[in-house]
Image (tube, coloured by chain):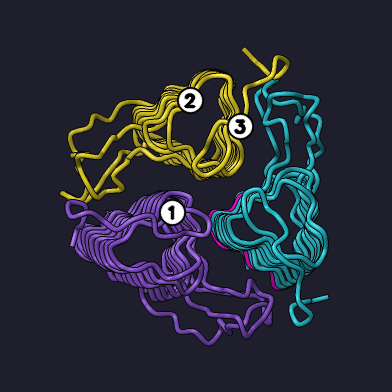
Chain colours: A yellow, B cyan, C purple
Amino acid sequence: MNSEYIVEYSTIIQGENVKIFPFCVIGRPPMSPSGLTSIDYSKLENKPVIIGDNTIIGSHCVIYNNVKIGKNCLIGDHVRIREGVIIGDNCILGIGTKVGARTTIGNYTRIMDITNVASDAIIGDHVFIGPCVIMGNDNSMGRDVNFHIGKGPTLEDWSTIGMNATLLPGITIGKDSIVSAGAVVTRDVAPGVVVRGIPAKVDRLLKEGERRC
Amino acid sequence: MNSEYIVEYSTIIQGENVKIFPFCVIGRPPMSPSGLTSIDYSKLENKPVIIGDNTIIGSHCVIYNNVKIGKNCLIGDHVRIREGVIIGDNCILGIGTKVGARTTIGNYTRIMDITNVASDAIIGDHVFIGPCVIMGNDNSMGRDVNFHIGKGPTLEDWSTIGMNATLLPGITIGKDSIVSAGAVVTRDVAPGVVVRGIPAKVDRLLKEGERRC
Amino acid sequence: MNSEYIVEYSTIIQGENVKIFPFCVIGRPPMSPSGLTSIDYSKLENKPVIIGDNTIIGSHCVIYNNVKIGKNCLIGDHVRIREGVIIGDNCILGIGTKVGARTTIGNYTRIMDITNVASDAIIGDHVFIGPCVIMGNDNSMGRDVNFHIGKGPTLEDWSTIGMNATLLPGITIGKDSIVSAGAVVTRDVAPGVVVRGIPAKVDRLLKEGERRC
């Protein structure tokens, strides 16, 4: 069921009933001019892209090599998925979202449009990430190698991130917790709380009827 | 005047002197794996895309089916317009902007680059929306169906939204009002005022010479 | 080394070992319906695009005409570079970033993903700009021509901009200064300081070991 104008750079292993819209690049190898980044991309293997049954890939997507997307997922138009990413089943990635390298995403997780998921992030099951959420994976901002964490945030199961929230590198959002729209999260957030503000602080505990797990 | 590499999924009704740049997908049907979203996309009709005289569509755009774009509009590259959207005449949509499903936009409205216009929003005439503005249409963030509004913001005529502002679902920005850069608007804003901050509060009334209507 | 599906609208002058991924539009002329913007695009010359040795251009990029990109640069997928832009050597532009018209970028500067670089901005050498940074170039937000600056920010050498920061039009970020994540910068920032908050205020001076120049 693939459309015209698909460019494939590596083996694609497709389940049944997969649909890929036009102008997608699948299996793109990561590349960089020599010496520009700390990774020697020429040494990375060109591993296949695996796409599960019934998954739909929107138009203009770029899926790098060594990526696994589960069953029954909806990948929006213009989504960019970097090398080494693993996405579970029944997930939604909204239009224009980017998922950084080596990040893992669980099952039943929904990520809305134009969100920037960091590299080396760990995102659980049933997580909801609103539109235009921003995550980092480098605390030093390129200034100090000692400060470099090289680790994206961890979003535990059922956590919920409001739109335009900013999540600093390496922080953890606890199970079922809510980050309010526009918050800047600079420290770990415990499970079962609502945080808001810049920097984000605990506003209140989740009430009985608000808990989802 | 259409370019090469255009993929059309439904009837396109074009006015005179329309220009469409390469790698566009026009009339794309909304689709989702069965059961993944609450909408049964297989039941939606494939209605045409209507584009008015002199309108320019940039490259890599995705325009879903059942969309109407008026005359003399400039649609930037990489713009995504979902199903059921109606856009008036003399509008600008900046590069990389997304317009959610069923949203209506009036005449002479300008939306800058990489802005995320929610689904089910109502945007008036002469509205200005800066770059990277974020809007939501679901107050529950997927957690509680009772809290679900399913309604984007309403931006009344001549209202002005500063860059990187966040507009929560269902709120109204009154006529000619100004939302400052980076504000998070959580409640309705009266006409003729300037709001700022997180959450946004009224900073002052518009002065006589600042009013535009 | 160019891929298939590249559309060229002007002369491309390529150095050695340049790689361009599929679905790029190179040399795109700026266009607008007559009278919609204040610029008469029909009078602009169609000047070439110049790309230096070893530079890699990702897929789905749109590079307007009259653009110069230096040697050894990595331009990510889905990057949009407007007319008149000049980029130095050894730069990185992340996935989905946009660079506005006539902006200049120095050498060894890194701009992360989905960042919106304003038109008419001046960005120095060794600058780091995190993901999803937003800059403006019009203080009036289209409301008052007298307030119109038409000038993007100036980012001096070695300055560092945290993710999701907002930089208002015309402001200067001084040499080696740091803007924290989520800050909204409304005034000039002196060299060698850290600013944070909305509006951004000086938090502290850089310590001895933190200075980079």
x and y, in percent, of residue B83 in the image? 74, 45
Q: Look at label 3 and name its amino acid.
A: Asp
Q: Residue at x 43, y 54 (%)?
A: C196
Crowd rating for badge 3 (residues with CA inside 10 Å; few <14, some 14–19, many 20+): few
The tag on residue A203 is 3
Q: CA distance from mark 1 to mark 3?
A: 21 Å
Magenta span contains residue B23: yes
- Quarter that holds the N terminus of chain B: bottom right
The tag on residue C196 is 1
Q: Mark 1, mark 2: which one is toward the viewer?
A: 1
- Quarter that holds the C terminus of chain B: bottom right
On what subunit does the disc labeled 1 rest? C
Q: Look at label 2 and name its amino acid.
A: Leu
On what subunit does the disc labeled 3 rest? A
Q: Look at label 1 and name its amino acid.
A: Arg
How many labels, in total? 3
Q: In this figure, which residue is indicated by the disc labeled 2? A: A155
- The answer to whether any part of residue B86 appears in the image is no
On what subunit does the disc labeled 2 rest? A
Q: Which residues are magenta?
A: B17-26
Return the residue nearer the eye: A170 or A65: A170
Relative placement, left or right, of B172 versus A211 is right
